[in-house]
Image (cartoon, rainbow, N blue to C red):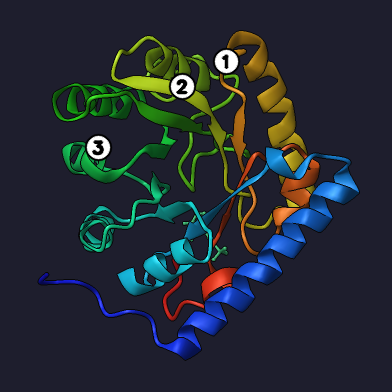
Amino acid sequence: MTNTPAAASSDRHSELAAGLARVRTRVADACAAAGRDLGEVSMVAVTKTYPASDVIALVGLGATEVGENRDQEASAKATEVAAAGVTPRWHFIGQLQRNKARSVVRYADVVQSVDSVRLARALDRASATVRDRPLEVFVQVSVDGAGARGGALPGSADPEAGLEPVAEMVAGMDGLRLAGLMAVAPLGWEPERAFARLAEVAAGFRVRHPQATLLSAGMSGDLEVAIRYGATHVRVGSALLGMRSTLR
Ligand SMILES: *Cc1c(COP(=O)(O)O)cnc(C)c1O
């Protein structure tokens, strides 16, 4: 076979095994502290900036969900990983331009960062032509209502970027399945305050969309708080794979 990625070195493999064990312990402890069942919380391994060999090693160690935030990098990595016969579920978690929709729906099982009606439409159209089953969608919420880190605006009737207009659009499309909400804690907010606010938004959202029960919140630095406030998916990069050299 050509283009098979090199296997991770045995040092790297041990590093990843240790990282995974540490994060699993943190998730289990946070679930126990919150009185939640461990089976309610999935870990998405955020592999951005790291090579396909790391994804393959992590899947070999039992990780099943992988997250990426840039289409060009993700698309190439997903191709390499698939060529090695390895098939995690790919989550796209970054800001997404509409013109990348056709690329993303080819490899992503889930897009967690849908925050506009226009993007939902583009993903639906792409999904309908390329995929044989609906794309899972989390609507990204702007917790501070300002949208600086992306996200639809809770409580806003803005027809393009209001949370409810975006959620209605996703829920009404054949190529998409509304799965839940995603958020990143706003810069300068204590995780406690951010995830408490998110939990309020999610409670209201679930009244209108009872089937959309998932909540993606929490990263390396704040996953315990997110689990306390109901996260079903934590997105963990640096605590698992090491500090990235670039800030993303
Ligand atoms: C990079 C990234 C993460 C992971 O961040 P860490 O702090 O490395 O765990 C989670 N969510 C999003 C949207 C990201 O871009």
Q: Is residue 109 left or right of residue 76?
A: right
Question: Residue at the spot x=67%, y=43% of the render?
Answer: 41
Q: Is mark 2 within 8 Å of ligand 1?
A: no
Q: Is residue 195 left or right of residue 68?
A: right
The image shows residue 6 at horizontal and vertical percentages of: 27, 80
On the image, numbered disc 1 is attached to which residue?
A: 211
Q: Quadrant of residue 187?
A: bottom right
Which sits earlier in the primary sequence, circle 1 or circle 2?
2
The image shows residue 55 at horizontal and vertical percentages of: 39, 65
The image shows residue 233 at horizontal and vertical percentages of: 60, 44
Which sits earlier in the primary sequence, circle 1 or circle 3?
3
Question: Residue at the spot x=23%, y=55% of the render?
Answer: 75
Q: Is residue 81 left or right of residue 196?
A: left
Which sits earlier in the primary sequence, circle 2 or circle 3?
3
> Which amino acid, by three-letter code, is at mark 1?
Gln
Pointer 1 with pointer 2, Cβ within 8 A? yes
> How far is mark 1 from mark 3, CA to CA?
22 Å
On the image, numbered disc 3 is attached to which residue?
A: 105
Task: Examine the rendering and report whether any part of residue 84 can be seen.
Answer: yes
* Callout 3: SS: helix
> Which amino acid, by three-letter code, is at mark 2?
Leu
Categorize mark 2 by other alpha carbons within 10 Å: few (<14), some (14-19), many (20+). Answer: many
Q: Quadrant of residue 214?
A: top right
> Which amino acid, by three-letter code, is at mark 3?
Val
Please tell me whether residue 178 is drawn above or below residue 246 in the rendered image.
Answer: above
On the image, numbered disc 2 is attached to which residue?
A: 178
